[in-house]
Amino acid sequence: MWIGQGTIVCFPASGEYSVRLVVTTANGCTDSLSVPAQVIVHPQPVAGFFPDPPRTGILEPEIQFTDTSQGAVAWAYVFGDGDLSLDQHPTHLYPDHGTYLVEQIVTSEFGCLDTAYHQVIIDPDLLIYVPNAFTPDGDGVNDVFLPSLDGFVVRDYNLTIWDRWGQSIFETSDEGTPWDGRVHGVGSVVQDGVYVWQIELQAQSFVGNKRLRGHVSVLH
């Protein structure tokens, strides 16, 4: 390849390149000089990593990052929350929910750099309060059983109540509909006793289904 004076050359791959200089005077006289291995192009490192898990909740906000880079001898991770690490395989504990862009910067033994990115999502906590007893006696105080959902938008919801024999006695897909102590809303209130409840839900800010189960006492 012939180049002119002051030209910048981009080499296609790493390796050693010999340089031959040819000069020509105004009278057409020429001379040349060859220098073997004059230019050394070092290989570029390839950044790469993956988070495990890439999405989790604020109750388990610890993420393990595994390096998969090639040709690197030094690593730097910027976690997106103001913290960083120089470990090759760091573990990071996120302090709050949110979406974080994690950056990995790798350096080769020759000082060459490369960068890779991954997104990590920390979902907010699902705040659920479920009463353990209620008194459906019609006095206007604690007359119904209604779980309280807070801190998230419900996408799908199902509440089921069973008696001690495993028979379903109440079910609703509306998170605002309480159980008034009657079998499927008909007839008189059930007898005093312990009943099993189950909540299945999906939230806008949470991955997958959530299933909770417990007991509620009916007292007259």
Image: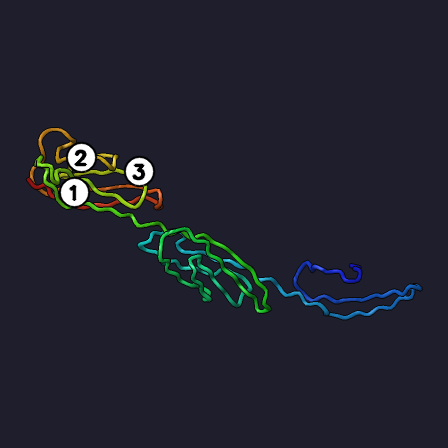
Image label count: 3
Q: Earlier in the sequence, mark 2 or mark 1?
A: 2
Look at the picture and state if 168 lies above or below 67.
above
Q: Amino acid at mark 2?
A: Phe
Toward the viewer: 70 or 22?
22
In the picture, residue 20 is in which quadrant? bottom right
Q: Relative to 126, say whether 139 is above or below.
A: above
Dot 1 amino acid type: Val
Whether the residues at callouts 3 and 1 have beta carbons within 8 Å, the answer is no
Expressed as whole percent of the image width and height from the top left, the position of residue 155 reads: 32, 38
Callout 3 secondary element: strand
Q: Which residue is mark 2?
A: 170
Which color scheme is applied? rainbow
* Amino acid type of the residue that numbered disc 3 sits on in the rendered structure: Asp
Q: CA distance from mark 2 to mark 3?
A: 17 Å
Which label sits on residue 19? none
- Looking at the image, residue 6 sits to the left or right of residue 27; the answer is left
| Above or below 39: residue 135 | above
Q: Which mark is residue 196?
A: 1
- Give the residue at mark 3: 156
Q: Residue at x 31, y 40 (%)?
A: 154
